[in-house]
Amino acid sequence: MELIPKRSLPEAEHKREFVRTIFDRIAPRYDLLNRIITLGLDQSWRRAALDSVGLKPGERVVDLATGTGDLAELACARGAQAIGVDFSGGMLRAARNRRPHGLFVQADVSQLPFRDASAGVVTCGFALRNFTDLNTVFAECARILEPGGRLVLLEVDEPRSRLLRWGHALHFQHLVPRLGAWLSDREAYRYLPASATYLPSEEELIARLEAAGFTRVSKRRHLFGAVQQIRATRI
């Protein structure tokens, strides 16, 4: 099955501003599209991610690329002190409007405005492929986490089964852009599926995390392998 062409992806030097611009544009309908595209399962994956790190009441959680604040809100509901970080002003406005009691900070994840060893947990939901330098982001995660702190990442993936890969490609590479064009923004929802190209392999992702200072890296799959959950512990 033909995939979305790579011409939908910005050149490396323009990626940062391109990503900021499209997320500003899609913020008003971002939650609606997430629920439709994931068949309403995205919140269950976020809850599973928080389960995996054994979140404790009172722990500080930093949620990277928080978007409209879904993960941060779920962490707060468990008694954590969650801070959502995003560099899209449009997304942060939506987060503050929908979750007026949340704490949200506009910042670049490659230069987080937090002290060393100041967080117990770092989370990130479906944003790795939007970052320009994963090594720097992972190093920042390690810097702000206390020793023994936990990192959990959610991201898209590809099923192993040939039949499931076909079904996943039909949904993710063809249906999602059409729904996005109809309900939100054509350019953005062509980019989002195509951006999976930026993701490193499982082996490379684990190696990068270990090089940044993480250990006990593990992977769990959701939705027959269409979504991956990566958990790691700060050394």
Image: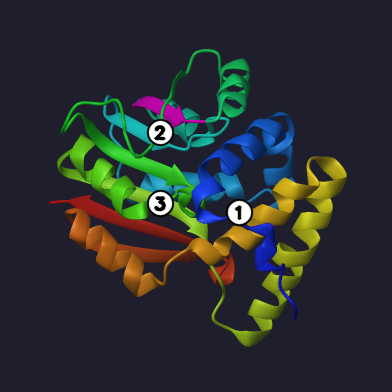
Disc 1 residue type (three-letter) = Pro
Q: Which residue is mark 3?
A: 153
Which quarter of the picture shows residue 225? bottom right
Q: Which residue is mark 2?
A: 108
Q: Which residue is mark 1?
A: 10
Q: Secondary structure at mark 3?
A: strand
Left or right placement of residue 216 versus residue 163 in this view:
left
Q: Secondary structure at mark 1?
A: loop
Left or right placement of residue 53 versus residue 68 in this view:
left
Q: Quadrant of the N terminus?
A: bottom right
Q: Position of residue 190 (x, y in %)?
A: 73, 55
Q: CA distance from mark 1 to mark 3?
A: 24 Å
Q: How dense is the environment of label 3, judged by Cα within 10 Å: few (below 14), some, or many (20 and up)?
A: many
The answer to whether any part of residue 166 appears in the image is yes
Give me the disc on residue 51. none
Q: Residue at x 40, y 51 (%)?
A: 153
Q: Is residue 49 magenta?
A: no
Q: Which residues are magenta?
A: 80-87
Left or right placement of residue 176 versus residue 31 in this view:
right
